[in-house]
Image (cartoon, rainbow, N blue to C red):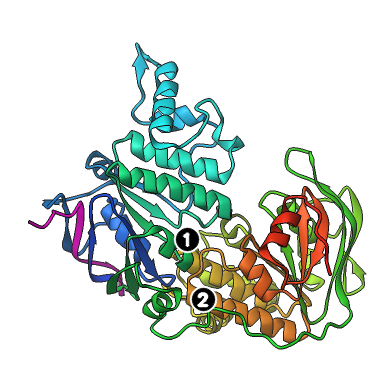
Amino acid sequence: MTEVPALELRRITKRFGTLVANDAVDFELRRGEIHALLGENGAGKSTLMNVLYGLHQPDEGEILLDGKPVEINSPREAIALGIGMVHQHFMLVPVMTVAENLVLGAEPRSGPLLDYKSAAERVRELSRRYGLAVDPDARVEDLGVGSQQRVEILRALFRGAKVLVLDEPTAVLTAQEAQDLFKVLRGLTEQGTSVVFISHKLNEVLDIADRVTVLRRGEKIDTVPTEGATERSLARLMVGRDVLLRVEKPEHRPGEPLLRVEDLSARDDRGLPAVRGVTFEVRAGEIVGLAGVDANGQSELIETIVGLRKPDAGTVTIDGRDVTHLGPRETLAAGISHIAEDRHRRGLVLEFDLAENIGLRFYRNMAKMGWLSPRKLAAKARGLLREFDVRGGDADTRAGSLSGGNQQKVVIARELNADPKVIIAAQPTRGLDVGAIEFVHRRLVEERDAGRGVLLVSLELEEIRSLSDRVLVMYEGEIVAELPPSSSEEDFGMAMTGGKVEVS
């Protein structure tokens, strides 16, 4: 007798106006299974899970839990049915403690007051049971992203989740944090929890999932076991063609320095030293990679270079012009394009439409006698949206309604079209699917070959090694090594953790 699946989605269809986000999609999740959901940006993965979680109502189709049809009209109903979801952008209250976040909406009480002692003990109990180590008394704003994610998972388990949906769970995690997460997920499935794992990272999917369902442009393409699958075969299912999984680039011919950073120092938001006497240069026609474990000063360095953070000492020059104290607008005007690592905080205005967001770099050219031309803005946007294959909307679509990967494409389209001398690309492929990553990598190489200087900042070591002509390693706010991209992972790992590396 065949076991009844923990979850079935049958013929789910969801439309937004004329856009069909999900077109008669079937999906099955077995008990104790990790089932990956793959697809390009805008393929309908998050929409399908938002239907399951009650954030969207399907236009057609049905949902079955343990073989019984259910109707889910809100997240509250989903939670009551044992469905938990950890969103790509965390939903925690930063000023509250871990325990307070966990019990929010279901607080244990002692009379009219919160029974904080019981809440904290419940956190400790769940932490022990599931191997999710967190301090119940820590404020969420003081935790790293890996710890915040554990809190999100604990919150779902606290509310009785038997089906756990993780939307891009490793997008902001280091490689070690991702491996820690995988251990937790395997432990959860051994205790009977079923997991839906949304990701773009094919190597992680092959590592963690039992089966994979692939969506393309809102339709289900296939469900395959990971046993016997390869990155190439999954990429072909996702994109509908063979995808180049390595970067091909001609030999670089560097020219004169376009970006010079000399003895630069800066502090973080707490007033503590984050950048300590950094000196380097990026020449015309080269990609310089900046590698390092997260939170070793990379973000503060980039913000200082583009004028978002004031330096304590040192200088920044663009093509011979000192821009150290100019501020962001003048620094960008001097010839820098900045693909920000946080597209929501620095890259986009989510309430603006796509034409307005793209126009943020070009509005002075779109104005006559102080008046913007909406027609010119829309025409500019439509051309770039086509060129960069941004899906899910047109020039008048609100930026916040796009998938994360398509939002990233909008930022990249705007910044690469600004005719810069220097491109600072911070986590440029975060949240992108394999086809979009191939496109962005190719464009960055084209920008290099056109004589621009590119500073690439990424937590993906393979991306750094495959794209860069030279690699700088940053540790505790200092540049501690310059390595050729062909250096071994062991050498990079040693340098990134402060060890000495002999460069031949």
Instruction: Tell me the residue that label 2 is attached to.
Output: 436
For image coordinates 71% across by 88% down, the residue present is 250
Quick one: SS at disc 2?
A: helix
The amino acid beneath tag 2 is: Ala
For image coordinates 53% across by 78% down, the residue present is 245
* Labels 2 & 1 near each other (Cβ < 8 A): no
Q: Which of 209 and 444 is in front in this view?
A: 209
Position of 303 with respect to 226 (left or right) is right
In magenta stretch: residue 11: yes
The tag earlier along the polypeptide, 2 or 1, is 1
**Residue 227 in picture, x, y percent from top left:** 34, 67
For image coordinates 73% across by 42% down, the residue present is 269
The amino acid beneath tag 1 is: Gly
Instruction: Tell me the residue that label 1 is attached to.
Output: 400
In magenta stretch: residue 146: no
Pointer 2 local density, CA inside 10 Å: few below 14, some 14–19, many at least 20: many
Q: In which quarter of the image is the C terminus?
A: bottom right
The residue range painted magenta reads: 1-21
Q: From the image, give the main secondary structure of the stretch colored magenta.
A: strand
Position of 57 with respect to 422 (left or right) is left
Q: Is residue 130 among what the camera can see?
A: yes
Q: Is residue 327 among what the camera can see?
A: no
